[in-house]
Every structure is written in structure tokens, then in C-alpha cells.
Image: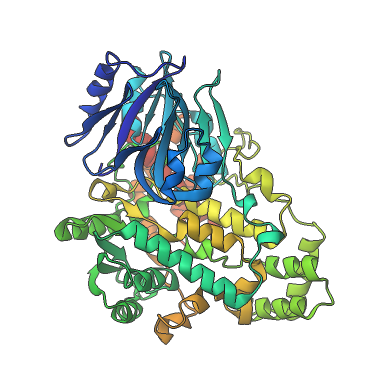
Amino acid sequence: MTEGYLVACALDGQPDLRSDSRSAENLVHRLPGPWRARRFEGLTIHVSPSTELRQIGRTVIIGQIFGDLAVLQRADLHPDLLVAHCWGNYLALHMFKSGRPSWLLRAPLGHLPVYTAAVAGKLWISSHVPELAAARAVRPQIDWSFVANHLAFLHLKTARTGLVGIEELLGGQWLDLSAEPTRRTTAWSPGMFVRTDIGIADFADASRRLAGSIDEAVRCLAGDGKVLLELSGGLDSSIIAAALALSKAKAQAVSLSTGSAESDERNYAQAAADAAGIALTLREVGKSNLIKRARSREARPGLPVILGAADAVLAQEGTAQAITAFFSGAGGDCVFATPNAAGPAADAAIRSGWAARSTWRTIEALARYHNASVWSVAGRAWQLARGASDPGSWRRTRGYLTDAVPLPDAPLHPWLSETSSMLPGKRDHVHAILASLAHIDGYPRHAIAPTRFPLLSQPVVESALRIPSWLWVEGGQDRAVARAAFANRLPDLIRDRRSKGALDGYALAAIEQQADELRPFLLDGHLARQGLLDLARVRSALRERVRRADPRAHLLLPLIDTENWLRAWLGDP
């Protein structure tokens, strides 16, 4: 791993002793490369060579942190104060004057993983799951109820992992290490930024502030390093390219194609790269092997297997160019509030009334965007505004789970308790951001360099949440505020683009071409042996010709990902 750390805190409130660091050393030896150990008032922290580690005041910071760092000098520093003044990809460990650990905070929307395991009176904390599993001194155990939940509630990541005894500290959460038992609290959540009293209701002001937050995020995350941008030519990655042009980083870009027309965006990518003054490499991605066992052991299914070949190409490029970080525009569709229903119109009606011109302007904009009638959009908005739809629970699917597996209630997540009281469109916005966070871990290329996701950073997300949902569809365009924010820095070809590259054909072709191999892989795999699958439905889906509009084919992909993840831990059944 290019970024990583390992630390142990005594749960009885005493700092980690030198004798305890010996067990940490044994675990560190399992990791590739020469890790270094540093002591802070008796606490031993092991980090990889490229991981930033420093102490400011009584707070130890692992990873990247930006903002008003002077706040870290306060002896009475509280997590709430830290998240209000700083952001980044960090883990903060605050200590009492005696050197005793006080609290542990993961940065809001921080992408440096924080996994925990309580073992023999100690709380082990690490970015790397295999070492926590080893710290438990037992063979890793799969949490099969997690596996069922994972398949029932797609794209929802909670503190729970697929391994018994290992949890994840979510972004914006902190642990009170002085409490007995250790207490988990949320210091940051979207609900803090969707309030009307801090909303940015003016379109020009919203676009200006959004541009500033993106430029800040890219500038800080890139530094003066050598970065490689995955540039599709879509709006989101093109915005990152434009922001990189103003940074001090040495930026390169790569555009990937699968050879099919729907994924060929080379013209768009070249236009974006030329506008930003960034050199572009064009690479074609071969077929993905859907039953290739995951190369790394993760806390839960990570990178979709269908993206494995693309990830390998990016890793090759990153190695050849000796980069310090990958950059991605992932999450842009979600952060920029791409509408999937009439939510923005419902929000406008609730705020301004049905007779307001602004409400009908939003209805008309959504009708143009969805290519629907004004009255169908108005009717749907009316239902949403009256609360006729689901008030915010996570969508649940049985997929290929057998009827004998009871579908549970949605797993707990601190954000979901807030969304039921939000406006319908803003609730969709928050749900989309939460879903995007389920797909940023488990990339094999992270063995080469970490990936930075500027559009999923705290400054950008906070700005986006403050913008009312109806502004994002101004003029009948999706992501309208983002388009306006970078209007003068993007070529017309990108700024006004309505189409979007897709991998549907690539994914479905892979399923059809590898159906013979997938049958024994799924029908005789760990999921099947655990009695979780409706084998007749799986067999039928693999036997029939794959059709793009058929959801059964798409639901095979998370099934394949989960079986691959299980085999990484358990081996072949």
C-alpha cells in the first residue's frame, strides 16, 4: 500500500506501551515495503513511507489535512471544532496532557480508510484490513448476515464490514476513547448543510462558490506532485482537468476505451485535455475476467470486477509515469445533483408554492431534461411534495437471494436518520452522495498510488449541499451549476454535452461471453453453499440471452463481485 498506518490504543485508557509495540511490529512485517515507527508520548504509530505523519499540539495527524491548522494547537480541541476548520484525508488522534488517548476522528468524506478491531483490551486501528484480521489471532470469519445485507441494499456502506470483529469508522465520525465502553459519535453530516438559512439561492453566487471549492480541493489534494487523471471527456473529469491546469501539479491524463462505440469518448477527452493544456494518453482496455479472484483482501466487496481490466491499465500508466496520485472525477453525477425524478420541482413547490413562477420554471426544466410532458412532471412532483413516496429509506432488492433469506431493515447509517425530514429533491441528493461513497475503496491500483476524489471532498460537497436542488436543473440541463461554474474554462463540446459514455454493453457482453465459466462459479460457490441464492433464477439468468434493459443481467454483477470477494478470503470452495 502506498498509504497505510497501524496503531493500537489500550481500551482501559492507558497509552500503548513499548512492550505492546512488538506485536504491532509483527503485523507490520506482513505489509509490503519498509514501514516506519514513531512514538508520540508513549503511543507507537506505524506508517508507510509515503504516509504523512505529524503532531500539532496534542493532536497526531495521519494523512492529508488542510485548512486552518492553527486550531490544532488548542489543548481543549474537540472533533466538532476540527471538522469546522479543517478538511482532508486524515485520521486525527487527540491525547490528554498525560499522553493518554482522548479521541479519534476520521475526516468527513476522507478517503483514508479507518478500520478498528478490539483485541485483548486494545483497540487496533488500521487502514489495512488483513493486519487487523491477523491481530485478532484467529482465522478471519465471514459475517454472513452482512453478505445478505450487502446484496439486499446495494450501494450502501455502513460501519459494518464483512468480517466478524472488524468495523469501519465512517467519515465524520469520532470515537471517545476515554469513555467506557468506547463511544462513537457523528461530528459531520449532510444535514448540517441543507438548512435554508445557509442556502445559496442565487445561481451566479452558487456557481462562483462551487468553482472556488473545486479549485481549492484540486489544488490542495494535488500539491506539486505528479498526478494522473482518468479523463473520460465527460463533464466531471473535464472539470477536474480544468482545475488541475491552475494547480502546481505536474498533471498527465489517460483516456480509456473498451473498443465499443458507447465507451469511445476520445474526441471529448482530447478536447478537454487540450483546453487544460494537459498531455493525454489514449489506451484501450481489454476484456475483464469476471471470475478472477480479487488481488487484495478488503473489508467488503470493493472495486467491481468488471472494472478490473481498466484498473490494471491505469496501474500500468501510473507505474510508467512514477506518479504520486491518481485523480478521478468519480462522484460528480451525485455531488452535482443529477436528477432522477421530479424532486427539484417538489422542493421548489414546497418552498415557494405551486403558484410561483420559479416552481413552474423548474417543472418545465425537468420536462425538457427527461423529455417528458410538463403535466407528468407536475403530477410526480405533487406526489413527492405530499409525501406519497417513501420518506427516505434505502431501496431494497431481493435480487438473487432465495426467498428463505429474510430481507432485513436497512442497515444503520447516521445520514439516513436525517434524510426523512429533508425536502424530497435534497434527500435524493444526499442519498446519491452516500451511494457514491460505496465505490471508492478496494482499487488494486492503490498499490501504486492513492486515488484522490476532489468532487467527493468536504469543501465541494458542503458547497453542493447548500445549493437548492432546483438550481441544478436550471435551463433544462443536468448539473447546471457546475456547467456554469466552469463555462469559461471548458470547450463548448464539453460544456454543452448531453450524452454520456457507458459501460453497459461492455459489462453485459462479458457476462454473455463468460456464461459457461460463471455457472459453476456462482452455482457451486460460497454464496450458493451458504444457502443464500435462488439457484434456479441464477441458472435461468445465465442461460438466457443478455438484454440491456433486463435488470436481471445487471443484478448478476454485484453477485459476481461478492463471490470474488469471498474467494479472496476463503479460497475456492
Q: Residue at x 51, y 46 (%)?
A: 83
- x, y (%) of residue 371? 63, 80
Question: Is 446 drawn above or below residue 168 in the view shown?
Answer: below
- x, y (%) of residue 235? 44, 73
Question: Is 447 drawn above or below residue 12 in the view shown?
Answer: below
Q: As rendered, which of 287 and 212 lies closer to the eye?
A: 212
Q: Residue at x 63, y 58 (%)?
A: 428
Q: Residue at x 47, y 68 (%)?
A: 212
Q: As rendered, which of 473 and 212 lies closer to the eye?
A: 212
Instruction: Tell me: 311 left or right of 174.
Output: left
Question: Is 400 drawn above or below residue 406 in the view shown?
Answer: below
Quarter of the picture holding the C terminus: top left
Residue 509 in sight from this viewpoint: no
Instruction: Tell me: 134 left or right of 551.
Output: left
Question: Is 60 drawn above or below residue 183 in the view shown?
Answer: below
Instruction: Tell me: 510 left or right of 47.
Output: right
